[in-house]
Amino acid sequence: MLCHNTEAVMASIRGQVYEAYVHREFKRLSNQQRSVVALFPEKPSQNMKLPFPKLTASEVFDDLKGLSSGVYGIPRSRSFASVDAVIGGKHRIALQMSVSAEHGYKVEGLKNIRNSLNLNDKDPLRVVLVTPADVTNVRFQTYVNHGRVVHEPKLGKVLQYWMVFPWEVNASEP
């Protein structure tokens, strides 16, 4: 499963396993120094630090409004809003796990997240694409609405980042 494979079926299985792995290892997200790449639509990407809270607990949620501040939230629904996890409260970080350099974000899903976190147009929602180390050349992700690319979605302030979260053979025990 740790091998790199671009065949659709294997990539899908690998993606599901990687997402489950990150959920299991979520505490390492905040225990490591978080260096991310800021992604911009028409400018070069740049390395930076993202303020990441210390995560001590995870919650499965039905409604994002009930997510505790600083908690790693996993949506109960597999079809949730276009991201795989949310860190609530003042941090406003949405995480999307992927084993591919191109993923795309659903406009309606991001709107729902912004509304559920009570963000106004100027409050940033930080969306982080989380990939294993073998995924390279990640660029600004497209926004999609009903299967069509939207170049200027009305989303309020959304900041995109990319973070490498490697598979580790000696990660914490289940």
Image: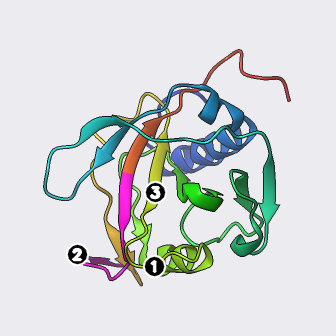
Which residue range is magenta in the image? 148-160
88 within the magenta span: no
Instruction: Report the quarter where the N terminus lies.
Output: top right
Q: Is residue 167 above or below residue 136?
A: above
Residue 136 image offset from top left, x and y in percent: 33, 34
Residue 140 image offset from top left, x and y in percent: 28, 54
Q: Nearer the viewer, residue 12 or 113?
A: 113
Q: Is residue 70 above or below residue 46?
A: below
Where on the picture, by quarter, is residue 169? top right
Name the residue tied to disc 3: 127
Q: Is residue 158 above or below residue 116?
A: above
Q: Secondary structure at mark 3?
A: strand
Which numbered disc covers residue 151?
2
Left or right: where 55 falls relative to 50: right
Left or right: where 124 falls relative to 61: left
Residue 42 image offset from top left, x and y in percent: 13, 57
Single out the residue that lies furthest toward the right: 174
Q: What residue type is disc 2 on?
A: His
